[in-house]
Image (cartoon, helix red, strand yellow):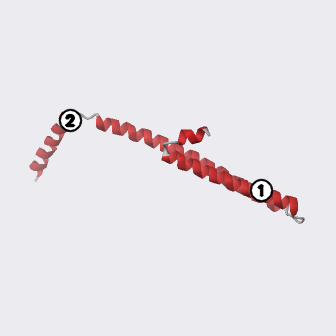
Amino acid sequence: HQLDVAANGHPFFHTVLELMYRELTTLGIVEFCIYLMHKYHKNFNFQMEAIFVDVHFMLFYTAVFNAIQSCFVRLLSGHRTDKSWVQTENIEDNHYVAIRKEFDRLEIELK
């Protein structure tokens, strides 16, 4: 519940959280099917089931790692972008006008 509240108002994090919930739901459904096969299938191949579970969990852990990595990249890029934007906003207008006049003068000279 706290993750849902924290993701509220942040579309990127909300999407990542939704994808994680979907993956957990898929994992639960698959494990429930395996449980039913254990319970009611007489000739169930336990070696194949073990391989299947290992592969499925590895895919799940890969998805979790990718979600964490995506969040980290989003936070890092957001921080860098915010820092650059603040620097851009802090440029003094007079300084910008002087640089622009110098650029225009040099452009006319080079023609």
| 38, 2: nearer the viewer | 2
**Mark toward the viewer: 1 or 2:** 1
Tell me: 42 left or right of 51: right
The percent position of residue 110, horizontal first and vertical second, equals: 12, 51
Q: Which mark is residue 93?
A: 2
Asked whether, in this view, residue 77 is left or right of residue 109, the answer is right
- Any mark on residue 66, and which? none
Q: Is residue 79 above or below residue 23?
A: above
In the rendered image, residue 77, in percent from the top left (x then y), is placed at 44, 43
Decide: is 45 above or below 7: below
Q: Residue at x 11, y 44 (%)?
A: 105
**Residue 78 located left or right of residue 25:** left
Are circles 1 and 2 on residues that touch, CB within 8 Å?
A: no
Nearest the viewer among 102 and 58 is 58
As drawn, which residue projects farthest toward the bottom? 43
Q: Residues within 10 Å of mark 1 (few under 14, many from 20)?
A: few
Please name the amino acid that badge 2 sits on: Asp
Q: Position of residue 5 (x, y in %)?
A: 56, 39
Quadrant housing residue 40: bottom right
Of callouts 1 and 2, the N-terminal one = 1
In this figure, which residue is indicated by the disc labeled 1? 32
Disc 1 element: helix
Amino acid, disc 1: Phe
Image-based side of 93 in relation to 79, left or right: left
Where, quadrant-wise, is the N terminus in this rendering?
Answer: top right
